[in-house]
Image (tube, helix red, strand yellow):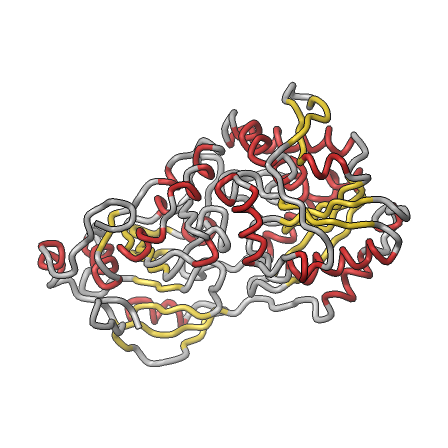
Amino acid sequence: MNQNGSKNARRDGMVAAILEKTELPRMCRVRQSFDDTHIAQLEDEVRIQLKRPGTLDRVMPGQSIAVTAGSRGVADIARILRTVVDEIRRVGGHPFVIPAMGSHGGAVATGQLGILRGYGITEESMGCPIRATMDTVQIGTAGNGMPVRIDANAAEADGIVVIGRIASHTSFHGSHESGLMKMVTIGLGKQYGAEICHEQGFGKMERNIVSIARETIASGRILFGLGIIENAYNQTKQLASVPAELIEAEEPGLLKEAKSCKASLLVKDIDVLVVDEAGKNISGEGMDPNVTGRWSTPFASGGPEIQRIALLDLTDGSHGNAGGFGMADFSTQRAFDKMDFDQTYPNILTPTVIRPGMIPIIMANDELAIKAAIQTCNGIDKENPRVIRIRNTKKLNEILVSEALVEEVLGTPGMEMLGDPAYMQFDGDGNLV
């Protein structure tokens, strides 16, 4: 029995015997090229952004200022946060950091502190206190009738600065998706805010985010926001400071820019996608559906056509949160053993979307998971399947493609062959080396 009480998959049992004749294709290394524009002098750019009227100039000497820190794996978040904290202190404010991540971290303060620590965000690295609580206080009622609640520590501050990456959401599309408005509503709202905002489903998600954030901003507690846009290589491409009252109006333009920067798979017709790792530090659903084409709700769409997904592992940075696991068809015993139900299920129960919390078919090792994915495809050339292997959905600059895709790669702008075809290599336990 493994740590979750289930029987171990066998790498030499009947499943292995059934898949023994399934052939794995030779794979070729390929480079995908995207725009790599990014900010070279990050701290300098933060300081430039904070010179915009209506941002840092709103911090008065002696004021306590809460600064939000989210749970997504933003590439430069520790450096950006530290610079904002330093600038608040320079003008006489007393900053402190708060975890702002809805129900993540198992919906407990210690879990959320652990997530921040994994990103290098500690009291020592920030040079200021970090105050974590799941307690909230009601500060008003939104136009849609929903109570508006924010982090209890933030509510006691003289002002709040919201910092967050602006990006596509994994479950709905709209003018406001993941960004500063969502940080105000769900980040500051903690588990309570996440639950009340999600309870009507993702079809009304944008409306609820905007309605609740609008009330919080109108309260005067939010001073300004700092939006982060990343390029396809997970580097900071753009920073945008926004006075609180302009966040709603300016965020749609920033979201449009963020979507134009996203990495993608330039080949769109795929039999099997092999994903080495997934996790909450990669995407809200472990694997970005913009890359996989697997959406958990009917309120978002797009991406490639893929018959089967084999997910091989969960990142250590996910802290056992396997949200999105269910979007794969096959996975491994290794990945399943890393799943922590108490970390995963609060993040499934709160948004009321259950498919991402389901468990895929578990295979004993990488080799069997990949073979099973190929074997169960319908209507394909199983002697020459169209297979792509990626590290994760954030790192798409170098991928592996099967020989069946070589001709298409050679004719696709932005794709370049880097090596000759070779079979995937497995260790004695059947896992990729």
Residue 375 position in % (x across, y down) = 18, 55
Residue 136 position in % (x across, y down) = 64, 31
Residue 162 visible: yes
| Residue at the image position 41 percent from the left and 68 percent from the top | 399
Q: Is residue 119 left or right of residue 141?
A: left
| Residue at the image position 80 percent from the left and 42 percent from the top | 223
Q: Nearer the viewer, residue 298 or 333?
A: 333
| Residue at the image position 44 percent from the left and 67 percent from the top | 412
Q: Nearer the viewer, residue 143 or 173?
A: 143
Does residue 21 lie above or below 260 as drawn? Answer: below
Q: Is residue 204 left or right of residue 181?
A: left
Quarter occupied by the C terminus:
bottom left
Q: Is residue 77 left or right of residue 352?
A: right
Q: Is residue 328 left or right of residue 179?
A: left
Furthest residue in direction top, as rendered: 145
| Quadrant housing residue 63 | top right
Does residue 33 lie above or below 354 as drawn? Answer: below
Q: Nearer the viewer, residue 315 or 245?
A: 315
Does residue 386 lie above or below 210 as drawn? Answer: below
| Residue at the image position 45 percent from the left and 52 percent from the top | 319
| Quadrant housing residue 183 | top right
Residue 430 position in % (x across, y down) = 22, 67
Residue 286 position in % (x across, y down) = 44, 50
**Circle count:** 0
Residue 238 visible: no
